Amino acid sequence: MATKEEKALSKISFVTQKAPVDERGRALYAVARSIIRALVDQIPESGLTVLNTDRADVTLRQLAYVARLQRDKGMRGDGFEWAVHEAIQGAEPTVIEPLVSAMKRASPRGFKGLEHPESLLFGYERAKYLGFLEAVIDNASEEAVILPDTRGRPPAFDNWVRLAATGEAAEPQLGARLKKIWRTDLFVSDQERHRHLAVTIKSNKEQLESGPGLRIGVVPEHKDLPAGVTKQTSKAGDSLWVVTLPDPHGFMGLYNDAYGAVGEAVTTLGRHGRGNYWQKPTPMAQKIQQQLEDYADVKVAEIEWALNEAAQQDLADVESRLLSVDAPDWLHLGQPDREAISLAPRPSFVKLD
């Protein structure tokens, strides 16, 4: 039986890079394989009960019904958030150094001698779950404050975080200085956990948004946004210090493309609502999407095997870790409208380049 400490931990699957990108087509297959494997790993027992099948026998269509891919709610966004949080906690230099620089620029007096920042995961969706919000507040000091981008006395951390945890509905009550703080993904602070800055994290730079209360944005490197720290100012006059994390082998762009291919296939097969029209995979990734849809009633285990045959096999892998956060359930549960076909073609994926 799990101990109390083990129950307080959540098992999360991350897709990680193990080697440089070799051939783009084979690399896309490799990342798509790992994304699908991670999605299957995260099906809870309650989901398997609804599907009435063992994990090893789940078909792609069944996975599509329970997979959770929406923006800011699924594995892609949450995985990147947790990866950044863990990098801060583990003092990873490539993350810590630009983050400290951004914190010092956002508040020169507050973080003058800062070397090792602390991180608190937030996200108003997680705050709905028992114990999560209390844990965030308890981990801050009793005198903890939030540093907005305005002059005046800093707001008390616990009072405003409790209000921000109710989400967008709290915006009218948050006041001019903190109006958008409900969008916070994590809070970074000094080692005493006294002064806090609200951070928004996006795995796609196009989704990065500023607003009153938000001070720092974190995104992966993009061809139009090199690694480093820059200041972004919106038309409304809101400023955001953007920390762009280095992506030496272009893995994040590749990941986004493969995720788009898997996401489009899952959206079609699971009959989910369509996302933004501009969030489309490249033509090469669309070929993966079409092939996945053609193998809808094949077991995911067989699809993984076929993807592995077509992939750069040593490029990516799935790591499962226990993290000390009270994460919400990963998946929406849905009931398939018909039984899966028992006989299906054996998948085989074509060469893309």
Image (spheres, grey):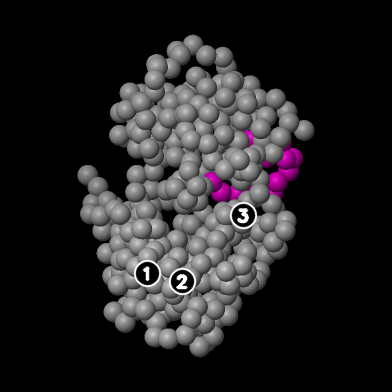
Amino acid tagged 2:
Gly
The answer to whether the residues at label 1 and label 3 have Cβ atoms under 8 Å apart is: no
At numbered mark 1, what does the secondary structure look like: helix, strand or loop? helix
From the viewer's perspective, is residue 228 above or below residue 37?
Answer: below
Q: Quadrant of residue 331?
A: top left
| Residue 203 seen from this side | yes
- Left or right? Give the position of 257 relative to 13: right
Mark 2: few, some, or many residues within 10 Å (few <14, many ≥20)?
A: many
Residue at 47%, 25% (x, y): give it.
61
Identify the residue shown where x is 35% and y is 34%: 333
Is residue 278 within the magenta segment? no
- Are circles 2 and 1 on residues that touch, CB within 8 Å? yes
For badge 1, the amino acid type reads: Leu
Range of magenta residues:
15-30
Label 2 sits on residue:
213
**Residue that numbered label 3 is attached to:** 206
Say the numbered circle drawn on residue 174. 1
Mark 3: give few (<14), some (14-19) or many (20+) Cα within 10 Å: few
Q: Looking at the picture, tell me which residue is in the foreground, 172 or 242.
A: 172
Can you give x and y, in whole percent of width and height, for residue 334 in the image?
37, 30
CA gap between label 2 and label 1 equals 9 Å
The answer to which of marks 1 and 3 sits earlier in the sequence is 1
Residue 210 to residue 337: above or below: below
Distance (Cα) linking label 3 and label 2:
20 Å
Tell which of 278 and 306 is nearer to you. Answer: 278
**What amino acid type should be assigned to the residue bearing mark 3?**
Glu
Residue at 73 percent of width and 56 percent of height: 223
Q: CA distance from mark 1 to mark 3?
A: 26 Å
Residue 283 drawn at (x, y percent): 71, 35
